[in-house]
Amino acid sequence: MNPRQKRALRWALYGALLFVTLLAQTVVLQHIRPFGLVPSLMPVALVCVAMRESAEHAALCGLLTGLVWCLAGGDCGSLAIVTMTASAALAALVCQAWLNRNLFSGVLLCLGGLLVVEGGVFLVHLYLGSVVPTAAWTVFLPALGLSILTSPIYYGLVAAIAKVGR
């Protein structure tokens, strides 16, 4: 395989991972709610992909992921286009400039990505009056904690996929 084919295969596998995550997020986890919460898997998977790629590729991946999330009817879909692009680009930039690519950095970047994406959604819901401010302690933060528990799984999957094109 030449390098171009390896890169295309790597991005196809990234796309498949993000698509399976989208299906799990929108279909499965809407009906099976661990502890009564819906974990947010898409930002975690996106940040794990972003920390393995350049900032330009990560931003494009975040833009496309946010667009697909919006078209799939995700919560605050149009806001997700901006927040997912920003979280992917920031994760790639921070990882390239200051952090090593290891599990601890992955968990920290996933937490930052979750705060950007889900924090934006929470603030919009708070502004519209569909949640009360105390929901930050009872819904928002526990959902972040539950979502961050999936980051080692996604980190391992993305690390295996990243080896394909290198």
Image (cartoon, helix red, strand yellow):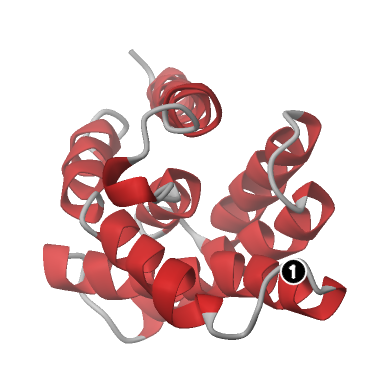
Q: Residue at x 45, y 27 (%)?
A: 31
User: Image check: 4 left or right of 143?
Assistant: right
Look at the image and tell me in which quarter the N terminus lies: top left
Q: Nearer the viewer, residue 82 or 41?
A: 41
Look at the image and tell me in which quarter the C terminus lies: top left
Residue 142 % position (x, y): 34, 68
User: Image check: 49 left or right of 63?
Assistant: left
Q: Amino acid at mark 1?
A: His
Residue 9 % position (x, y): 41, 19
User: Image check: 121 left or right of 11?
Assistant: right
Q: Residue at x 42, y 73 (%)?
A: 138
Residue 56 % position (x, y): 62, 59
Callout 1 crowding tier (Cα within 10 Å): few <14, some 14–19, many ≥20: some
Q: Which residue is mark 1?
A: 125
Q: Nearer the viewer, residue 21 or 137?
A: 137
Numbered marks: total:
1
Q: Residue at x 42, y 32 (%)?
A: 29
Q: Is residue 36 above or below residue 111?
A: above
